[in-house]
Image (cartoon, helix red, strand yellow):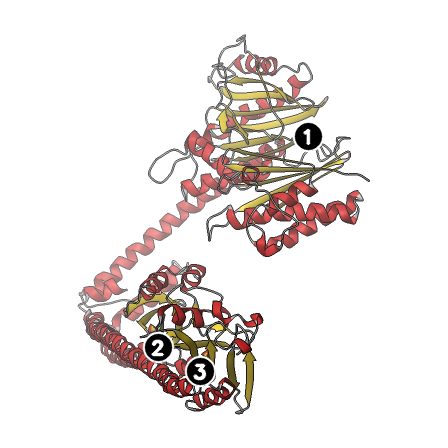
Amino acid sequence: MAQLIKSFGKRLRLQILLSVVAIFSCIAAMYYSYGRKHETEMAIRYSSVLLGDMIKSLNMDMLRVEHAVSSSASVIMAGLDTPDSLMSIVCSTINSDNLIMGGGIAFSPNRYPQKGRWFMEYATVDSMGNYTFKHLNSIEYDYFSMEWYSKPASTGKTWWSSPYFDKGAGNRLMTTFSMPLSDSNGQLIAVITADVHLERFVQKLKTLRPYPDSRTFIINRSDGTFLSHPDTKLIYNATIYKYAGTINNPELWLIGKKMMKGQSGTECLHFNKSDAVASFMPMPNTPWSVCTISPMPTILQQLGTTTTNIIIILIIGVITLMFLIRIVIARATAPIKKITDAAYNIAAGNLNTPLPEIETDNEFRRLRDAFAHMQQSLKTYIERLTETTRHQQRTDSELEIAQKIQLDMLPKTFPPYPDHDEFDIYSRLITARMIGGDFYDFHLRDNKLFFVIGDVAGKGVPASIIMAVSRSMFKSALSQTTSPAHIISIINDSLAENNAQNMFVTMICGVLNLADGHLCYCSAGHNAPLIWDNEKGTHALPCLPNIPAGLFGGYAYENQTTKLVPGQKIILYTDGVTEAMSANKQMFGVERMKSTINSSHKYNSHVDAKELVNDIFKAIHQYTGTIRPNDDIAIMAITYNRYSEKSPDIAIRKELTIINDIEEIAALNAFILSIGRSQGWDDSTIKGIKLALEEAVSNIILYAYAPGVKGRITIVALCHDGEAEFRITDSGQPFNPLEHEVDIDTKANVDNRGIGGLGIFLMRRYMSQLSYEHSHNTNNLILKRIINK
């Protein structure tokens, strides 16, 4: 209808609306852009100024403390002859400033021989004004080794210590200002101290935030440790580098680097899921730096409110304008309403709806005539379409029945032999049309697995007939021979007889001896199967260049043999897999299929046949997108298992897959406990195996994968007669823990014992045998233990 209105010159409404919206949108965008830039600059200036004021305020507090201590120096010098009277001077220093929560006079070694090597007068005051006095004169409080004493004593200069918990004296988290007191010869007499409760600085920081939800913190420039932070768990427990790495914020890491260098400035960063502005500055006379982070949404809150009001005014204006324009245009286009109503009735299926008569020769009359022509054309088209659809429905119904019959001929119950775990098999087929020419089949007899997969040349009904004949002949040939070459020869001779249409089948037939893994196979011009194992990954199985079945009768097909080792998989497929096309006309190819198979085993080498086949189909679908396949796709996967749970020498085989998260250790312990209880192990045996496996798996969780990378860890438990075996596999960084053993002195004190080696010690203590190998990008650690019942 928009085109009809335009043809009548009724573009005014749309043009006016678009013009108004464009003008108002430009104004709003310019306002917001300018306002955002202006508000951001103002926020940066405001944060910098406020941070500077904050630093000055904190520095003034610290200068007051320094002044109080320096003022007491002369009084202490006058009272050195009466050491027992010095406690009153300490109390006077504490009373001189409410920031000081404790103080003392720590004398140099043996200053007063009668007092001993250590002699310190110390006092603290609590929030109620109650004093506690301490005479520290023993090695239990060896203040000579403490930073607040050793730094001024060695340098002869005043010192602000890093925050610490003073156990034995203040018993609080605090920082200490120390001033050395020396005689006229420069010999150290004592160190005068004043303790400031760190919480007082923290409370002051909270009152000096630029915005209500700003976050302010202090770090120690010597090691980056948080001295103050809104999250109290981080104080003294984390550095700014560690915190930035934990929240994955490289911008905060760079800010921390500048703070550690004592730089000041303002930076924009992404913090707590929003943009933010960070201002930072070092504190004079201390090894500390302060930073405040203000979220951008808060800074731009007023700008956002103003912009919202502008948008609301724009919407109201546009709605009002739309209403006025609609009234004007509705009057001008009234004649078209009748034609529109008739058009809706025709569209609803009422093709005999009469069209209104228009006498004037104008655009409305020409429009009415066009609808009349369309009405007659629709009648004719629908009559023809109805007949065509009726015929097509009959054909589709017949093809659906044929497709159901065809698919019912193929195995569809998996696992087909649930009592046999010597192998695992799964197959799947997708046809390019309703019916197709790809097929597969398998049969178990005399502990041998017979299997076949084939692809009939062509598509549709002819190919489906040849497919059904080929599969039936495979079933029939199994009763005559066990040789794959002979089976294909029987099928070839039957198809070649009276083959006027030159139809042929590529196929591969095989017989797998489940007792020893011996595989005999024969290919009739088919795609070479792929073999996967944990050592070599995915590689092609060699095939002789035999001709497809059905071309020439009497052709001598040849068998080939190989042997599958436990754990190997054989993947058979038709050319619809490798020839699947992407949107840019590139084929899926054999190499991409190999890569898909390897990727499916990357985190778990025990992927079952069904999951592997579905992974390949998923990769094909992702590669081709919405493009419909131009050929049938059939895939069969067979796994020759390493162990049979029905085998008499295996009591139990269980598997656990976890991710590299330390909380998964609980699942590991439950897994071991379940096995131990089922096997009747005593508590001591279960406990020892738990310790050994906890150490091995914890080491993989913590160090095998890069930070933030998720990976899988698979633990396979095999219980033989009198032996338990645990196979731990991961795809992390290659690392052999057995090459990094160190001697462990188990009698040494924990504080004096070297770092590392305890995990290997525990594994060797509780397990009988350890071994390691790295193959196909996988770490394999094997732990065995003899079980004595």
Residue under numbered circle 1: 422
Residue under numbered circle 3: 200
Q: Amino acid at mark 3?
A: Arg
Q: In front: mark 1 or mark 3?
A: 3
Q: Position of residue 614 (x, y in %)?
A: 54, 40
- Whichever of callouts 1 and 2 sits on the residue coming sooner in the sequence is 2
The label shown at residue 298 is 2
Density class for disc 2 (Cα within 10 Å; few <14, some 14-19, many ≥20) is some
Front one among 63 and 540 = 63
Residue 253 image-quadrant placement: bottom left
Q: Position of residue 656 (x, y in %)?
A: 64, 45
Mark 1: which secondary structure? loop
Density class for disc 3 (Cα within 10 Å; few <14, some 14-19, many ≥20) is few
Position of 189 with respect to 720 (left or right) is left
Q: Amino acid at mark 1?
A: Glu
Position of 92 with respect to 255 (left or right) is right
